Image: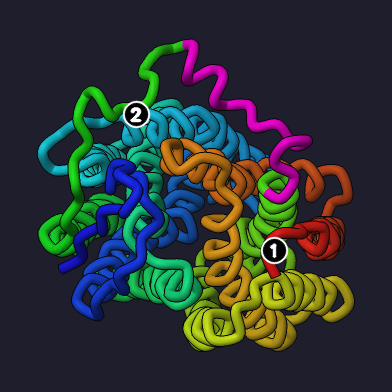
Amino acid sequence: MTTPQYTTTGAPAAFAEPQRAVTGRWITAFAAAWLGVWMAQLGPFQVLLPLQVAEGTGIGVGAEEWIPAVLAFGTISGIAGACAIVAFPVTGFLSDRTTSRLGRRRPWIIGGAVLFALALTGLGVASDIVAVAVLWSLAIVGFCVLASALTALISDLVPVRQRGFVSGWMSAPQAVGIILGVLIITELFQSEMLPGYLTMAVGLLILVVPVVLVTKEIPITREQRPEFSGAALVRGLWISPRKHPDFAWTLVSRVLVNTGNALGTGLLLYYLAFGLDIGIDKADDALLPLIVVYLICVVISALAVGYLSDRLARRKVFVIWGSLAQAIAAFVLVFAPSYEATFVAGGLLGLGYGAFLAVDQALATQVLPDPHDRGKDLGIMNIAFQVPQALAPLLGALVVASFDGFRGVFMLSALAAILGAVVVSLVRDVK
């Protein structure tokens, strides 16, 4: 179990920089929770949601209908992204000020998981596009609440010397979650909506339980709680780039690199179906081997690079390398539009994104302006992950519709990743 340390200066222990190493037991529980989170979010996002939207837009009528389906999917994802912009910082602000006996983060882990699971269950019986849009937005809000609280545990409990490795165990389960979710959905339930969504919901709840049980937080009192008002929330949403330039550069870099990744992966099912003419009925089967390649590379890269980053006490070089590897993957899809080439791109994307996820998360925890607002500030950082993931399909759909193909999407993906690498190099106080 992990217990925060009190400071010798008399400052509240909940706000102190952690010094005691977290245990393997806690890391295992933390990784299990993220496995549940990624499985529940990315499994449906890759397969169930696009198929559900396609059915709702009549895609089975003829191939000429695929662009409206992509636009509808992008719009729903964009609406959910707008909800995430609000949910992440507000949840972080509230968890920073929570005085529950369970601590500041665990009540929000529990609440977020329940909301997420209920919304997924509702999606299993939703039949029209409006209901799908509302329920997916609620699912993303639940995801934001849960992810915000879990991410804040890194800053609360994990010393800097372990953050690359622990962040690797936050990142590696993303790839495992995708493959596990897609396997369950496509192989076990043949992409049927209710069984697929319900299994994701139940799996999420089961996998989140261990981290709630093994995490030991020191609650804060009302006297220790930072200012708790609407005005404080509004003020806290603005973090001056002049006063905190490293925070600003890290945030901008995150937006760019995650946008690049999302553009490269968010429409992958449609790319296989229509860009490579595989067909919507066979695209989910074609997607699975690609995800396996991506999975293996993400896991290897996230864990190895996260550990190496801790050992060398270096962050930026690995973030830059990870960003550029993703740009190269996008260029492969631009210049070699074939199913075989997607495996090369998937491997490069996995290696780059695994390195980026692990080390960039550790970097983000080292540029936070105020220990009293770790949850809120990391919530703002998390916007730079979730919102590009949600909005990129809409942006990508507009590019596809404008250029009648996917090549422009992958060019934009490469450009965003390259710019992200340039921006993160401007961070000064973290090596």
- Secondary structure under tag 2 reads helix
Residue 120 relative to residue 406: left or right:
left
Identify whether 412 is placed above or below 287: above
Point 63% across, 26% down: residue: 238
Identify whether 59 is placed above or below 357: above
Q: Mark 1 or mark 2, which has the lower sequence index?
A: 2
Q: Quadrant of the N terminus?
A: bottom left
Front one among 69 and 80: 80
Q: Which mark is residue 410?
A: none
- Mark 1, Cα crowd under 10 Å, few <14 / some 14-19 / many 20+, is many
Residue 59 can be seen, yes or no: no
The range drawn in magenta is 231-246
Where's residue 90, x and y in %?
43, 28
Q: How is the image coloured?
A: rainbow
Q: Residue extending furthest front? A: 9
- Mark 2, Cα crowd under 10 Å, few <14 / some 14-19 / many 20+, is some
Identify whether 3 is placed above or below 336: above
Can residue 241 be found in the magenta stretch?
yes
Label 1, label 2: how many angstroms apart (C-alpha)? 34 Å
- Secondary structure under tag 1 reads helix
Point 43% across, 74% down: residue: 162
Tag 2 residue: 94
Q: Are marks 1 and 2 in contact (CB under 8 Å)?
A: no
Point 66% across, 40% down: residue: 71
Tag 1 residue: 264
